[in-house]
Amino acid sequence: MGCRPVGRERQAAGHTARSCFVWPRPSRRCRTTELRANSISPGLIETNQTREQLKDPEWASAMLGKTLLGRLGRPEEVANVALFLACEESSYVTGVDIVVDGGMKVW
């Protein structure tokens, strides 16, 4: 996928984000900008800390049993979601939280 970051200057984008996205509904001014607001919610991701915790068989069994995939996520899997959101290919994606948790949320 030919990804390249999209967006406006940081200061302008930050100001627009604060003024447009106010609960309960966004401002109509946002319709004329290319500003997109998304978030990523990672689940249990393999890190130095989680590798240490996996040494505890009780913890490992409990946590891995909560994922549909039966494994920890890898940092690059979360990074790939961020890369997708920064790409032109995701230009119609906005206002969403993408959960990268191997299916933990389903349980």
Image: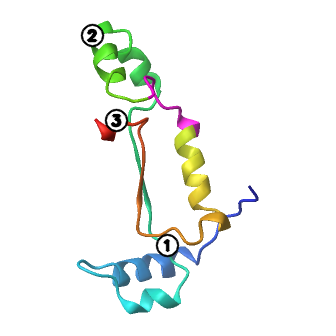
For label 2, the residue is 58
Quick check: marks 2 and 3 in contact, CB under 8 Å? no
Q: Secondary structure at mark 1?
A: loop
**Kind of residue at badge 2:** Glu
Question: Pointer 1: what residue?
Answer: 36
Give the residues in magenta.
Answer: 69-76
Main SS class of the magenta portion in the image:
loop
Q: Residue at x 40, y 23 (%)?
A: 50
Mark 3 or mark 1: which comes first in sequence?
A: 1
Three-letter code, disc 3? Met
Q: Mark 3 — residue?
A: 104
User: Where's the C terminus, which quadrant?
Assistant: top left
Q: Residue at x 35, y 78 (%)?
A: 18
Q: In the rendered structure, which disc, 1 or 2, sits on the residue that comes first in sequence? A: 1
Residue sitting at the far left: 24
Q: Residues within 10 Å of mark 3 (few under 14, many from 20)?
A: some
* Rendered image quadrant of residue 79: top right
Q: In x, y percent, where is residue 77?
A: 56, 39
Mark seen at residue 76: none
Classify 100 as above or below 26: above
Q: Is residue 82 above or below residue 100?
A: below
Of callouts 2 and 3, the N-terminal one: 2
Residue positioned 71% across, 63% down in the render:
4
Q: Position of residue 58 (x, y in %)?
A: 27, 10
- As for residue 70 lying within the magenta part, the answer is yes
Residue type, mark 1 in image: Arg
Nearer the observer, disc 2 or disc 3? 3
Front residue of 86 and 19:
86
